[in-house]
Amino acid sequence: MSVPTHLGTDFDRIFDAHFAEIHRYIARRLSVDAADDLAAEVFLAAVKGGYDSSRGEVRPWLYGIATNLVARHRRTEVRRWKALGRTTEREAESHEDATLARVTAGALTGRLAGALAGLNRGDRDVVLLVALGGLTHQEVAAALEIPYGTVASRLNRARKHLRKALGDVNPLKEAHDG
């Protein structure tokens, strides 16, 4: 990736400081293979968009770009979660099911995957930025360019949905509240 000379040093610093965590966030939402491509796209978009320090911290801005790119893959993501949910409801009946179950073992449990697939996009993005990205409410608000209060209400609504879907188990630790 060619970086304009006026951005070179700053971009190198931003890339070095944040690439691994952005890659990890995308990998946890999609897959490692998808993260390899999408994490690079995040930083390409960042260079093209140019970072404006008046927008606040660079970290939430990068997570916002990553979340938007993940949204483009939403259909695949939801299909994957639904498939994960189905694999725990029945025995693996085919080679494809067995392979899917092995590949995704340890990533997300079937019930949680199904519950996440049942959330609307906005609620799911907030939950995953908090749970997988470790962002505070303020950082989520900046990443998604939504008001702080909207983050809290989406997270509350998502927690209720997830608790109900998981049999009144709290899927998120309250310690993540920002």
Image (cartoon, grey):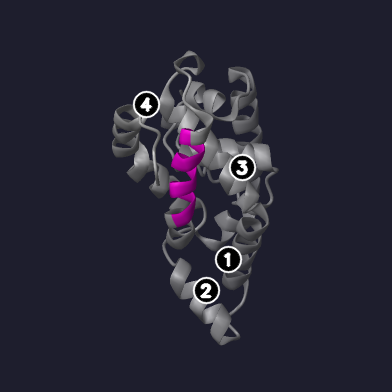
Kind of residue indicated by mark 2: Leu
Q: Are marks 2 and 1 in contact (CB under 8 Å)?
A: yes
Residue bearing mark 2: 100
Q: Nearer the viewer, residue 24 or 53?
A: 53
Q: Is residue 174 visible?
A: no
Report the predominant secondary structure element of the magenta stretch: helix
Query: Of the residues under marks 2 and 1, which one precedes in the sequence?
Result: 1
Specify the quadrant of the image occupied by residue 112.
bottom right
User: What's the residue at 59%, 86% (across, down)?
Assistant: 94
Name the residue that disc number 4 marks. Answer: 6
**Residue 67, horizontal then vertical, whole percent:** 55, 41
> Which mark sits nearer the N-terminus, 3 or 1?
1
Local crowd at mark 1 within 10 Å, few (<14), some, or many (≥20)? many
* Residue at screen point 53% across, 31% down: 49
Q: Earlier in the sequence, mark 3 or mark 2?
A: 2
The image position of residue 34, as x and y in percent, is 49, 58
User: For residue 157: magenta?
Assistant: no
Circle 3 — which element? helix
Judged by depth in the image, the label closer to the viewer, 1 or 4, is 4
Q: Are marks 4 and 2 in contact (CB under 8 Å)?
A: no
> Cα distance, mark 4 to mark 2?
45 Å
What kind of element bears circle 4?
loop
Q: Amino acid at mark 1?
A: Leu
Query: How much space separates mark 3 and mark 4, taking CA atoms?
Result: 37 Å
| Crowd band around label 4 with a 10 angstrom C-alpha radius: few (<14), some (14–19), many (20+) | few
Q: CA distance from mark 3 to mark 2?
A: 22 Å
Q: Which residue is mark 1?
A: 84
| Cα separation between marks 2 and 1 | 8 Å
* Spatial CA span between label 3 and label 1: 16 Å
